Image: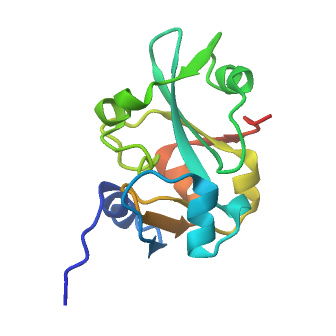
């Protein structure tokens, strides 16, 4: 029997004693979140993507939003106290976070950045986020996650 390979995200959750469920799906390369939710037969409204932005101050920020939604950069900037923020280029994701596009998660990055989770997640018992690699999603309680990574819930989408 093959040993389960744990990601940094999974190890972090276990260290914090946060209960999670890992769900795997077949995927060789980046796929959008709506397609991924369909593959796992889970509701897109409960499935969240992780976006990384940089402010004018050059600080990095993490935003976690429903997969079918788009980040409102003005609202996002306001929540982190910046005049403006811009999403980082895809080619910088690994250098900044330690994760690849499609496997980026707010848990267990190289450095813990200020994180904002869309407020709709705060109303859910569980939600799904990337598990730290392509083809892996984690189901967990969003409030427990926010407490573990010092994230706040705000309306950051259009």
Q: Quadrant location of the N terminus?
A: bottom left
Is 108 left, or right, of 141 in this rendering? left
Q: Which residue is found at the position 42% from the left and 50% from the top?
A: 107
Residue found at the far right of this picture? 158
Q: Which residue is found at the position 35% from the left and 57% from the top?
A: 12
Q: Which residue is found at the position 59% from the left and 18% from the top?
A: 85
Quarter of image, res 44:
bottom right
104, 10: nearer the viewer: 104
Q: Quadrant location of the C terminus?
A: top right
Is 19 left, or right, of 28 in this rendering? right
Residue found at the far front of this picture? 28
89, 124: nearer the viewer: 89
Q: Which residue is found at the position 61% from the left and 65% from the top?
A: 37
Residue found at the far bottom of this picture? 1
The mark tally for this picture is 0
Is 58 left, or right, of 76 in this rendering? left
Is the residue 8 above or below the residue 113 in the image?
A: below
Q: Position of residue 98 (x, y in %)?
A: 30, 40
Q: Position of residue 18 (x, y in %)?
A: 46, 67
Q: What is the image's colouring?
A: rainbow
Is the residue 40 above or below the residue 49 in the image?
A: below
Q: Position of residue 59 (x, y in %)?
A: 45, 18
92, 97: nearer the viewer: 92
Say whether residue 143 is visible: no
Is the residue 147 above or below the residue 63 in the image?
A: below
Q: Position of residue 31 (x, y in %)?
A: 50, 54
Say whether residue 29 is visible: yes
């Amino acid at each position: 029997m093959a040993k389960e390979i744990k990601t940094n995200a999974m190890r972090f959750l276990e260290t914090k004693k946060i209960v999670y469920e890992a769900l795997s799906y077949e995927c060789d390369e980046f796929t959008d979140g709506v397609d991924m939710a369909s593959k796992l037969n889970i509701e897109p409204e409960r499935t969240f993507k992780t976006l990384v932005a940089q402010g004018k101050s050059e600080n990095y920020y993490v935003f976690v939003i429903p997969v079918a939604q788009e980040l409102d950069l003005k609202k996002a900037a306001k929540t982190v106290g910046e005049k403006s923020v811009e999403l980082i280029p895809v080619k910088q994701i690994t250098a900044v976070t330690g994760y690849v596009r499609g496997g980026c998660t707010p848990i267990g990055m190289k450095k813990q950045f200020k994180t904002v989770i869309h407020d709709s997640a705060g109303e859910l018992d569980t939600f799904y986020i990337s598990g730290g690699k392509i083809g892996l999603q984690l189901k967990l309680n969003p409030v427990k996650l926010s407490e573990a990574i010092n994230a706040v819930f705000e309306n950051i989408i259009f």
